Amino acid sequence: MKITKDLYQSSLVLLTDFYQLTMAYAYWKSGKGEQEAVFNLFFRKHPFQGGFTLAAGLDYVIDFCRNFRFDKNDLEYLQEMKNKDGSPVFEQDFLVYLENLEFTCDIDAVEEGTVVFPNAPLVRVKGPLIQCQLLETPLLNIINFQTLIATKAARINLAAQGEPVLEFGLRRAQGIDGALAASRAAYIGGCASTSNVMAGKLFGIPVAGTHAHSWIMSFETELEAFEAYAEAFPDQCVFLVDTYDTLNGVRNAIKVGEILRSKGKEMLGIRIDSGDLAYFSTQARQMLDEAGFPDAKIVASNDLDEHIIASLKSQDAEINVWGVGTKLVTAYDQPALGAVYKLSAIKNSEGAWEPKVKVSQQSLKINIPGYHNVKRYFSKGKAVADMIYLEDQEIDSRGVVIIDPTDATRRKRLMPAFYQEEVLLKPIFKKGEKVYTRPNLHEIRDRAAQQLESLDKAHMRLINPHLYPVGLEENLHHLRMELVLQAKKFENGHQAE
């Protein structure tokens, strides 16, 4: 079956904040609309107090940009917008400009499934100011959510220690699109399957599911319900055993398992959805083993997350498969990543790039100026550090110093000649044309697993992870500090007046 990935076949250009349109209009009015600029999308802190983040959402970004245009209905809606005095918000000539607008930006981005870190760009957009500005909100919307969910899924899968995690979150997800995006991102993060059938169809994710308590309750007895289910699905029987009495449910599952075996079939397992999962799973395992079903799996669900799974593991719970829903697809303990999109350079009238910096009283919010990229260094297959550097900066193979962008006292010396390296921002669009070969979702998931394997386990601890070194190349650090000091001097000069 052909798997469609183009969810956004029509233009969604109005999926933006109103101020992006007002800025676009003001750029056009001031004659700056076609001036070239560079924007970077990045985040400032890992979600879930973790030590890594897993990038996701690029595939949606590609579809969005390929269909970036203002159609007739979009323009009619904008034409109807009025100021308080009844005058049009947007001049007709501006709407004509939008009607003829073609996507011509360069976009470079980290590939989906890449482990990423604060302050380093996930997406870099270069092009006319108007186009770059109009991309801000949709890119943040897409990347923020899918990156958040992929990261949550990776953490849950790490807690499960290689045992399958099934994503069961559709009914609790934030709407239709949120459910689809969450299922996709959860698969990237390592989940083995989804209960979301539409996600299975669109993305080729394996689907899984058994039955609900209502199935049991619709029969006179639990045993009768299990027998009927086994008759319908003799090759994939996983019985939900906690509708009335969990241990009695296990006994009934064993009885039906014996009937299946007499017909040459095997019960796959049981599911426990409530109560003391450590206790009931241990008791169920003993009962299944004694009855001759050592291969029957025990599936657990019930508001699980990485911390509960880790706790159950520490209690030697006899659970083989983990069904995780609400706390995964809603990123229950941190519902937003908080990525931002900032201008970092603008091309002047002489055609040279001028680095731009946003100054803040909070050092965390001072952006990184210039036209820059990210390079990752590896030693024996393990990632050792990321360096943010200016594209035109020659890197000395004899040694470079990287400086933490939020704490200049944290520095690390690297000897590039002794490391393998990878430039993380890959070309996706050049002058509006897609130049990137899109991997399928299974390849992205494999990349995510390989990327996590490249990290030291200390960076993946659920609690108090070790800080992975990410820093500015020394020259970029000095440029940033110089621009900050200039901006503060300019600001103070105006204050003195």
Image: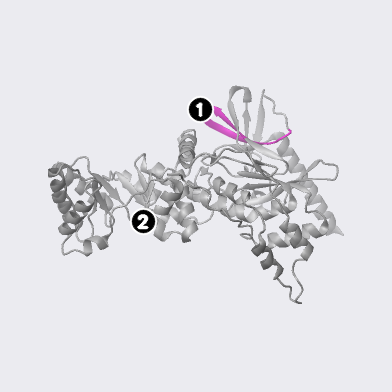
The dot on residue 381 is 1
Q: Please determine whether, in this image, residue 18 is positioned above or below residue 230.
A: below
Under mark 2, the amino acid is: Asp
Rendering coords of residue 48 (x, y %): 49, 50
Coloration mode: one colour
The answer to which of marks 2 and 1 sits earlier in the sequence is 2
**Segment tinted magenta in the rendering:** 375-392
Rendering coords of residue 147 (x, y %): 52, 48
Rendering coords of residue 74 (x, y %): 65, 63
Give the left or right position of residue 345, taking residue 3 as reference.
right
- Callout 2 crowding tier (Cα within 10 Å): few <14, some 14–19, many ≥20: some
Give the left or right position of residue 185, taking residue 360 as reference.
left
Q: Quadrant of the N terminus?
A: top left
Residue 461 at least partly seen: yes
Q: Secondary structure at mark 1?
A: loop
Give the left or right position of residue 76, taking residue 194 as reference.
right
Q: Quadrant of the C terminus?
A: bottom right
Residue 415 at least partly seen: no
Pointer 2 residue: 303
Separation of residues labelled 2 and 1 (CA atoms): 36 Å
Q: Residue at x 46, y 48 (%)?
A: 184
Inspect the magenta stretch and tell me whether residue 383 lies in it: yes
Give the left or right position of residue 417, taking residue 299 as reference.
right
Q: Please determine whether, in this image, residue 461 is positioned above or below residue 220.
A: above
Under mark 1, the amino acid is: Gly
Rendering coords of residue 386 (x, y %): 60, 35
Query: Dominant secondary structure of the magenta stretch?
Result: strand
Q: Secondary structure at mark 2?
A: loop
**Residue 319 picture quarter:** top left
Towards the viewer: 63 or 491: 63
Towards the viewer: 125 or 491: 125
Number of marks drawn: 2
